[in-house]
Amino acid sequence: MRNNIFLSLILSMLLLTSCGKCIETNLTNEEKEWFLVYEKGQTMIFKSNLGHLDTLVVVEKVKQHNNSDCNYYGIGPMQPEIMFITFKLKNCNNESYCEGGIFISKDEADKIFNPSFRLFGLSYSQGYANLLSKETWCVLKTTKRKYTNVYVFEDGINAKSFGRGYLKSFYWDKKEGLIRYDTSEGEIFELLKK
């Protein structure tokens, strides 16, 4: 009798843990387009209006599904495809403000998602501001070239600064990636080469 109860309990637990069906979501080509610009190990060099150079290195580029083992009851039914890129300043004095990156997670199958961005403590995500739209992009002319589809992320407008407020804004082109960032002290760094 005890064996039957024990066996019934084990079978019930197996049925409960296996009856949930997970839904794997996949990013669209349009959503993935934000991530085509960089590869792991790639270097970007920025030059400021004061003659200073900053070198950023892509240290991580990941594409995967979260909840890959379908923990239906613990995490939920979604297995969202995610992508992220992380880059770091090659020489940095304050580790907390040395990184930047872009991240996206396809949390629902039938909805278009925009990426989140962060650079040296200044972050943009759909939680802080409205969706990326034509109203958040502009034409930008730098000393090297003209960009016609640039997204501007500015502290207090559509981005939020965490920490000491080093950056005032940064500029991202969907096809070229990070092209400019402005410090709170007025120094402007533009992409020199990648």
Image (spheres, rainbow, N blue to C red):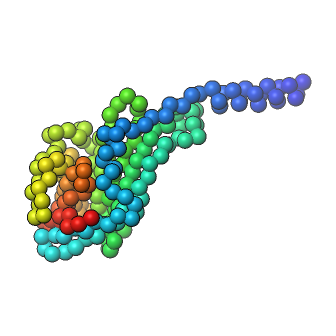
Residue drawn where x is 83% and y is 26% of the image: 5
Q: Is residue 155 left or right of residue 18?
A: left
In this rendered view, identify the residue nearer to me: 7 or 102.
102
Res. 121 in view: no
Residue drawn where x is 27% and y is 48% of the image: 124
In this rendered view, identify the residue nearer to me: 157 or 98.
98
Q: Is residue 188 left or right of residue 174?
A: left
Which quarter of the rendered picture does the N terminus lie within? Answer: top right
Vertical placement of residue 162 versus 23, above or below: below
In this rendered view, identify the residue nearer to me: 70 or 76.
70
**Residue 160 x/y as whole percent:** 25, 51
Residue drawn where x is 15% and y is 67% of the image: 187
* Quadrant hosting residue 89: bottom left
Vertical placement of residue 114 versus 77, above or below: below
* Quadrant hosting residue 42: bottom left
Which quarter of the rendered picture does the C terminus lie within? Answer: bottom left
Residue drawn where x is 58% and y is 37% of the image: 71
**Residue 122 x/y as whole percent:** 27, 55
**Residue 127 x/y as whole percent:** 31, 41
Vertical placement of residue 43 versus 39, above or below: below
